Image (spheres, grey):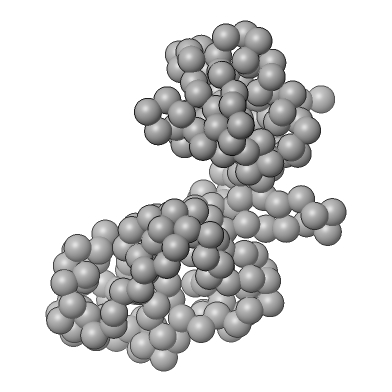
Amino acid sequence: MGDWTLKALGLERLDEVAREKLGALSPVVLPRGHVLFRPGDPVRGFVMALSGRVGVYLSGANGRELLLYSVEPGQTCVQTTLGLLGEQQYIGEAIAETDISVVLVPREMFVELMAQSDRFRGFVFSAFAERLNTVMQVLEKVAFVTVEARLAQCLLERAREGEIKATHAELATIIGSSREVVSRRVEAMAKSGLLKPDRGSIRILDPRALALRAQYETRDI
């Protein structure tokens, strides 16, 4: 039985039969930037993240991208679950945002565990509901929250020791805007003393004031 099943978030109460089957699978380490799937790819199995973060993006006809959600340990991919249950192809793209460790549960084993293991099925549906709620929050923010508020919240959430390593184009994808709009907002925040932008990174100078910007709820007109 693989040790990873004992350490994986969400599987603490898994029954022994399901744990033994999953434990026979080996985790795979993938580098940052690895593409796990693209639009049109068939869903070959259930991906379980053990470490790192995967971003799932949706691309529009105009070439713009939107980060639908991120998958971290203990979380699952909505598109994968829907694809396995409804036999649908992927409509988005999943990219490793950091080095990741994942386990791929083959389709046949996934279907078998869903039918036989109440606790595995409970984990899948609970994680699915959480991810679906995240998608709804993203849509709500894009529709009703200002670009500045979305950007401020994004910067606060992704800061490590007060610094965010991301380009304006990457930030635009995350918050569902354009690079030009993000650049203007970053420049305005920098002039107000909230941020110090640099090439490929942004340092937060006033986290309290930035948090106030993240609370604005009125959509830009």
Residue appearing at x 56%, y 63% in the figure: 94
Q: Quadrant of residue 208?
A: top left
Decide if residue 208 is in sight here: yes
**Seen in the image, is 11 located left or right of residue 149?**
left
Residue appearing at x 66%, y 36% in the figure: 168
Establish if 90 lies above or below 60: below
Q: Position of residue 212 (x, y in %)?
A: 52, 15
**Seen in the image, is 197 located left or right of residue 169?**
left
Residue appearing at x 53%, y 70% in the figure: 36
Establish if 79 lies above or below 169: below
Depth check: give the residue in front, 36 or 209.
36
Looking at the image, which residue sits at the far top? 192
Depth check: give the residue in front, 51 or 133.
51
- The N terminus - image quarter: bottom left
Establish if 175 lies above or below 202: below
Looking at the image, which residue sits at the far right? 62
Q: Quadrant of residue 169?
A: top right
**Seen in the image, is 66 located left or right of residue 17?**
right
Q: Position of residue 215 (x, y in %)?
A: 55, 21
- The C terminus - image quarter: top right
Looking at the image, which residue sits at the far front? 199
Decide if residue 219 is in sight here: no
Q: Quadrant of residue 29?
A: bottom left
Residue appearing at x 50%, y 33% in the figure: 164
Q: Position of residue 203 (x, y in %)?
A: 50, 23
Depth check: give the residue in front, 215 or 193.
193
Depth check: give the residue in front, 213 or 195.
195
State how many labels appear.
0
Q: Position of residue 130 (x, y in %)?
A: 44, 54
